[in-house]
Image (tube, helix red, strand yellow):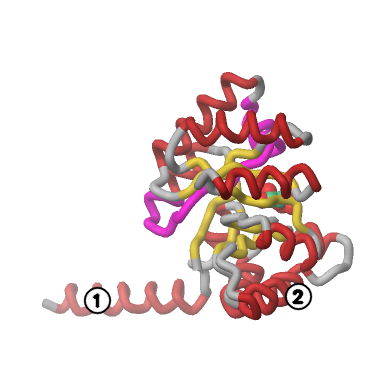
Amino acid sequence: MKFFIDTANLAQIKEAHEMGVLDGVTTNPSLMAKEGITGHDNIINHYKAICEITDGDVSAEVIATTYDEIVAEGLALAKLHERIVVKVPMIKDGIKAIKYFTSKGIKTNCTLVFSAGQALLAAKAGATYVSPFVGRLDDVSTDGIQLIEDIRLIFDNYGYETQILAASVRHPMHIIQCAKIGSDVITGPLSAIAALLKHPLTDTGLAQFLADYQKGANKA
Ligand code: G3P
C-alpha cells in the first residue's frame, strides 16, 4: 500500500520523505491556505517545491468547476512537472474532464468522493486515483472504511485499474483498516503515519535491551 502525505507543509513532506516511506503528496485548497500559500503564482511555485522533495505523484487540485475551465487549468498544472496529478472534483464536468485528461495520458485524482456510485463513475472515466474521504464520512456517522471495502469489491469485480486513494485518513487505525481491505493508497497527516511507529512494549523493550547492554559493558 502506498503512503501519501496530505499536507502542503514542506517541512512535514521532507520529514516523511526522509523516513523513507513517502510515495506521494496530496494537497487541496484548504491545505494550501493553512500554510498561508495564497494567490496563483505562489500556489504554482509551491507545487513545484513539493515536486522537488518527493519522488512520487503530487496531486494539484483545480479550482475551476466548468468543463472548459477545468481542462485549461488541469493542462497548465500538468505542464508544471511530470509528477503532477490533476485533482478534479466529483462533479459532472469533472468526470467529463477526467475522461479528457485520460485520453491525453494525464494522470488524475477524482476528489470529494463519498459514495460507491461516485467511485464507479470516476473509474469509468479512467481516473488514475479515486479519493473517498474516510474521516469526513465518519464525522457524519457513516462508516468511511465500509466505503473503501465497497469500492474495492466493485473495482475488483470489473478489473478497474483506478487506484483507491483513501483520503481524509485521520489516525493509525484508519491506515491499518485500509491496508486490511486492500486500499491501494492512503493519504493522511504526518501524525497518523508517525503514530504507526508507536508501541509501549517497543519503548520498554528497547530501554531494557540498552540497560542490559550497559550492564555487560560495565562488567567488561
Ligand atoms: O485529502 C482530503 C483531505 O485533505 C481531507 O481531510 O481531514 O480535512 O477531512 P480532512
- Residue at 75% over, 75% down: 146
Closer to the camera in the image, 196 or 103: 103
As helix, strand or loop, the secondary structure at mark 2 comes to: helix
Judged by depth in the image, the label closer to the viewer, 1 or 2, is: 2
Q: Is residue 212 left or right of residue 187?
A: left
Q: Is residue 112 at all visible to an observer of this figure?
A: yes
In the rendered view of the protein, which quadrant contains the C terminus? bottom left
- Residue at 60% over, 69% down: 160
Badge 1: residue crowd in 10 Å (few <14, some 14–19, many ≥20)? few
- Amino acid on which the number 2 mark rests in the picture: Gln
Relative vertical location of residue 138 with respect to residue 112 in this rendering, above or below: below
**Residue under numbered circle 2:** 146
x%, y% of residue 48? 47, 31
Q: What stretch of residues is rendered in magenta?
A: 16-37
Q: Is residue 109 left or right of residue 206?
A: right
Q: How many marks?
A: 2
Residue 54: image quadrant is top left
Q: Residue 112, which numbered label?
A: none
Badge 2: residue crowd in 10 Å (few <14, some 14–19, many ≥20)? some
Q: Residue 213, which numbered label?
A: 1
Residue 128: image quadrant is bottom right
Relative vertical location of residue 82 with respect to residue 113 in this rendering, above or below: above
Question: Is residue 20 inside the magenta stretch?
Answer: yes
Q: Is residue 169 at all visible to an observer of this figure?
A: no
